[in-house]
Amino acid sequence: MSDKPDVNAAYALNGVEDVRALYRDWAKTYDADFVEAMGYVYPQEVARVFAERRAAEDAPVLDIGCGSGAVAEAAAGVEMDGLDLSPEMLRIAGAKGLYRRTIEGNLLARLPIPDATYGALLSAGTFTHGHVGPEAMDEIVRIAKPGALFVLGINGAHFEEHGFGTAFTRLAEEKRITTPDYVDCPVYADGSHDHADVRALVTVFRKT
């Protein structure tokens, strides 16, 4: 992992403690050095797909891996809770007044959230290199209400390398989720950096 908090360091993470350390050091400059400087439009894409697919009953809403709150900012006016591993990032998001409440939790362990709590679950930037793989799907399905809408952005290369398709097929065959739809989207609008061509699959399904 690089000493400097940046996207290359984020993609090189290896384990929960690496993630906590990176975002502890990056929290205060994350918006300026990453979201703004790199033209990070991924949260806007996830919020757009959510707005297109959302029904009135899809509430309450949880932003998974909320970071500094970019998804909530893009989905202006939608009341939601924010979940993240990093207490430092949650403090940044909390100070913006974006969330009804913030929750510190590890997607690779049991979350401090009861079964069947949320009617919609969104995510941008969490299911990517060095972060979280498909092993978290059982846990996020657990905390969703029957019929809950999922709008999960997944890094395109990470999707292929780590077996997200197989995980979704298993959950659909077990009749725990509907068959997903996939919306291809850009992660960055700024074409001047090394990651400009990164794409994501916004994966949309419902809990059955």
Image (cartoon, rainbow, N blue to C red):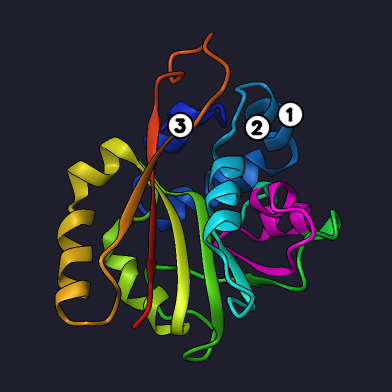
Residue 13, position in %: x, y? 39, 42
- Residue at far top of view: 192
Q: Quadrant of residue 93?
A: bottom right
Query: Could you tell which of marks 2 and 3 lies nearer the N-terminus?
Result: 3
Residue 53, position in %: x, y? 52, 60
Q: Is 78 one of the magenta-colored residues? A: yes
Spatial distance from mark 1 to mark 3, Cα to Cα?
16 Å
Q: Is residue 166 above or below residue 196?
A: below
Query: Could you tell which of marks 1 and 3 lies nearer the N-terminus?
Result: 3
Discs 1, 2 touching: Cβ within 8 Å: yes
Mark 3: few/some/many CA within 10 Å (<14, 14-19, 20+): some
Q: Is residue 111 above or below residue 71?
A: below
Residue located beneath label 1 in the image: 32
What kind of residue is marked 1? Ala
Spatial distance from mark 2 to mark 3, Cα to Cα?
15 Å
Residue 203, position in %: x, y? 37, 54
Discs 2, 3 touching: Cβ within 8 Å: no
Q: Is residue 39 above or below residue 43?
A: above
SS at circle 3? helix
Residue located beneath label 3 in the image: 9
- Quarter in which the C terminus is drawn: bottom left
Side (left or right) of 96 relative to 18:
right
Q: Is residue 74 above or below residue 35?
A: below
Tell which of 75 and 197 is nearer to you: 75
Residue located beneath label 2 in the image: 35
Tell which of 14 and 40 is nearer to you: 40
The residue at the point 64 percent across, 72 percent down is 103
Tell which of 206 and 27 is nearer to you: 206
Mark 1: few/some/many CA within 10 Å (<14, 14-19, 20+): few
The residue at the point 56 percent across, 55 percent down is 52
Q: Which residues are magenta?
A: 71-93
